[in-house]
Amino acid sequence: MKFALANLSPALTQTACVVLPVFEDSQLTAAGEALNKATESLIGQVLERGDFKAQLGKTYLMPFAPGAEAERLLLVGMGKEDKLTDSRFRKAAQAAYTQLADYSLHDALIALTDTPIKGRDAKWKIRLLAEIAETSFYRFNEFKSQPSPFEPPAELSFYWPEALESSDGEAALKVGQAVGQGKNLARTLGNRPGNVCTPIHLAETAQTLAASDSAFCVEVLDENQMQALGMHSLLSVGKGSDEPPRLIIVKYQGAEDPQAAPHVLLGKGITFDTGGISLKPGEGMDEMKFDMCGAASVLGALEAVRQLKPRLNLIFMIAAAENMPSGRASKPGDIYTTLSGKTVEVLNTDAEGRLVLCDALTYAERFEPASVIDIATLTGACIIALGHQATGLLSNDDQLAAALLEAGIDAEDRAWQLPLWDEYQEQLDSNFADMQNIGGRPAGTITAACFLSRFADKFAWAHLDIAGTAWHSGKQKGATGRPVGLLVQYLLDLDAQLAAKTSDGTAA
């Protein structure tokens, strides 16, 4: 889709459809009032008759708009104005795009920009509208022999009043589109089946993304290289599979200073998780192809970075393996020496994500990072704690945690912080090794993070548990692309802070 700004009033814009916000009390925005006047109160008559009550997420198509330049109008219910929040705005926009998708229109004008939301300016709204447009018109049809015919609009215009600076609108559109496309890449990787999306497939995807840009370089460690390094914990997870594990490292040089400490994004890439010898129940096991969604979100963030070029040094890492049962697979009670030299007693082979991540965290030390964020579908306990709304966040650095929480709010991709107190660490005590890989049922999300924290004591580190937010089950089954929005916003915030320091004349 092509995105553009539209400076003319929606009443004067030629388009197949104008998407217009309406509040429950029949109140219109300034753009809506202009359209109502141009159509000789046609919109007002619909609202006065009660044909459209403007409840949140409801839509109403006016197939003709005499007096306006648009061929038709799509009214979108925003609910009560004083109740409109970021998430409700997202819901209304998604409803509008869902309806547009049914009409197979060549183009449309999205006139939701002047909808009043407390604390949010037009740039924020444009960016979110662009992102939601990309994700709303996404379809995954790779493996259907006869996919349903679907054509998204060739062009979407976004109302941007002439009084506003056009460069701000263009920048916001660019960010929204990049984030949306990054999320869609993450969704595609997550939706691909385990027989296609293997550790080698993830490595090849990273190489393809980086190939066209000299700011990126890729290194992929195979099982022999990891064995030589001593990454026995990561290798133990892939022992039962015929698919070889990989450690994928993509370096991005965006800072003016090539020696500037990089920020690391590390994704769990378990491309299929049977649980290994600690076999999962068969029901719903197909969804374990989504156990690489942490890796997918890292590649989605990489795609957005490729488009936006933040002035940072970054490292994108993926610890990829397939967890299968076989005569070679790890057994409960096995003990492995990690890259750090610490030993781990594996009491449950289905707690494998932390086993691949711990060696990757130790490997990240060599980059002397400014921060490390790992992203993983790590614990079912996170779903019990937070449901499917918020990503779990745990960190050894309060400033890093606060930055991620704020980024999640701004990106409308929220996280919630859980404690990482020393008292939880003793649940990992082992009689036979330095630690065991599970801490029992109580506080399962926290003890999993406690395990990882033992390998992240040399840098500022945060852990994002996306087990509840990475995919949908049921009729709408599919990867969500979260938390690409949060990650990209975090990186853009770092870039903005660096720019502010530079403009102030202080050391970057």
Image: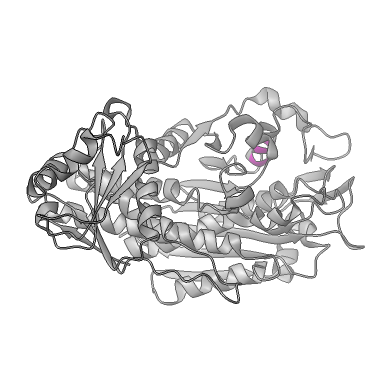
- Left or right of residue 149, residue 201 in this image: right
Q: How many marks?
A: 0
Can residue 411 be spotted in the picture? no
Percent of width and height locating residue 239: 82, 62
- Left or right of residue 217, residue 238 in this image: right
x 38%, y 52%: residue = 132
Percent of width and height locating residue 1: 33, 67
The reply to whether the magenta stretch includes residue 145 is no
Instruction: Tell me: residue 31, above or below residue 301.
Output: above
Viewer-proximal residue among 20 and 90: 20
Q: Residue furthest front?
A: 49
The magenta stretch is 448-452
Instruction: Tell me: residue 254, above or below residue 357.
Output: below
Percent of width and height locating residue 211: 45, 76
x 65%, y 71%: residue = 200
Percent of width and height locating residue 204: 57, 73
x 49%, y 36%: residue = 415
Q: Which residue lies furthest to the right in this view?
A: 327
x 30%, y 69%: residue = 154
